[in-house]
Image: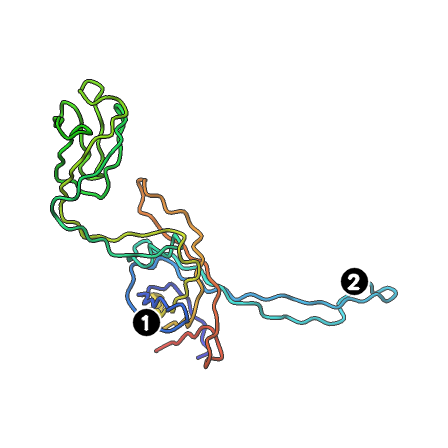
């Protein structure tokens, strides 16, 4: 038990994103955790002398523990952690295939304008009276994935005309993340790990950690994105400590 050891660790990180009231919802393997660094902290209080020939010398000192923090990094993550990186919330996106209702769209010559929705399959575009039907490729272009229309300067759509557009959409199933809609996210973390140096297994439990995303997530780049969370460890009701580490051998 008292023998010195060296340490290089690997671990699977099981994460439970707690409810707003701190209720456990179940652990999941969220992705590849590339760093898990708990950091104890403390503040030292010193009482110094003002006596002759002793000014500045320490008479007494105490070390007062401060809240424990932790840095967690993921270079692979699920939708819930992705949302947490932006203080966001997820919702299911479902779009049925088929024609949608006609709508008015104010065109801008040689610039893209949104029609609405995503994954446009086709569209019928007419003048405001509905009597003249414009021709795709001659009068306008469509960006089908983003569901946008561009009136061509070489076509017959007058600049600024309010066209009538009847879109037809492809079926879509996805996830929408709305940023800055959930500022307080608390998680539980359980590590299933092993020390490379001596082969010992370990389990690390963090019962409640309040997340604060601290890294930039670039949507364009040549390297795999990594998300960094800093957080403070809280001690839930019924526990005497915020973290427990167990060696199994």
Whether residue 35 is situated above or below residue 248 in the rendered picture: above
- Crowd band around label 1 with a 10 angstrom C-alpha radius: few (<14), some (14–19), many (20+): few
Left or right, 48 with reference to 70: right
Q: Which residue has dot 2 on it?
A: 56
Residue 58 location in percent, x, y? 75, 67
Q: Residue furthest right?
A: 52
Q: Nearer the viewer, mark 1 or mark 2?
A: 1
Whether residue 249 is situated above or below residue 41 in the rendered picture: below
For the residue pair 114 and 221, the one nearer the viewer reads as: 114
Residue 211 location in percent, x, y? 43, 61
Q: Quadrant of the N terminus?
A: bottom left
Residue 193 location in percent, x, y? 33, 69
The image quadrant that residue 148 belongs to is top left
Residue 25, disc = 1
For the residue pair 51 and 143, the one nearer the viewer reads as: 143
Q: Secondary structure at mark 2?
A: loop
Residue 174 location in percent, x, y? 22, 52
- Which residue lies at the image location 45% right of the left edge and 64% below the top edge? 210
Whether residue 114 is situated above or below residue 7 in the rendered picture: above
The image quadrant that residue 121 belongs to is top left
The image quadrant that residue 44 belongs to is bottom right
Q: Quadrant of the C terminus?
A: bottom left
Left or right, 234 with reference to 223: right
Left or right, 44 with reference to 33: right
The residues bearing labels 1 and 2 have C-alpha atoms spaced at a distance of 54 Å
Labels 1 and 2 touching (C-beta < 8 A): no
- Which residue lies at the image location 42% right of the left edge and 50% below the top edge? 215
Q: Residue furthest top?
A: 154
Q: Which of disc 2 and disc 1 is earlier in sequence? A: 1
- Crowd band around label 2 with a 10 angstrom C-alpha radius: few (<14), some (14–19), many (20+): few
Left or right, 46 with reference to 186: right
Q: Residue furthest front?
A: 129
């Amino acid at each position: 038990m008292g023998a010195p050891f060296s340490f290089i660790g690997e671990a699977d990180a099981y994460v439970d994103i707690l409810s707003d009231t701190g209720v456990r919802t179940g652990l999941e393997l969220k992705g590849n955790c590339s760093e898990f660094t708990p950091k104890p902290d403390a503040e030292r209080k010193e009482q110094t002398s003002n006596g002759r020939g002793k000014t500045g010398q320490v008479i007494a000192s105490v070390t007062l523990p401060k809240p424990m923090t932790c840095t967690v990094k993921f270079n692979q993550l699920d939708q819930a952690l992705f949302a947490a990186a932006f203080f966001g919330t997820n919702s299911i996106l479902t779009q049925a295939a088929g024609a949608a209702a006609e709508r008015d769209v104010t065109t801008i010559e040689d610039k893209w304008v949104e029609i609405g929705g995503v994954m446009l399959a086709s569209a019928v575009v007419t003048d405001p009276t509905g009597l003249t039907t414009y021709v795709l490729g001659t009068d306008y272009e469509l960006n089908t994935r983003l569901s946008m229309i561009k009136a061509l300067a070489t076509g017959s759509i007058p600049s600024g005309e309010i066209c009538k557009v009847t879109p037809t959409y492809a079926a879509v199933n996805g996830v929408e993340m709305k940023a800055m809609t959930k500022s307080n996210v608390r998680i539980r973390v359980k590590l299933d790990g092993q020390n490379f140096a001596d082969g010992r297994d370990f389990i690390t439990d963090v019962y409640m950690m309040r997340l604060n995303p601290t890294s930039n997530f670039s949507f364009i780049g040549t390297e795999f994105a990594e998300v960094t969370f800093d957080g403070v460890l809280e001690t839930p009701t019924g526990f005497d400590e915020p973290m427990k580490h167990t060696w199994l051998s």
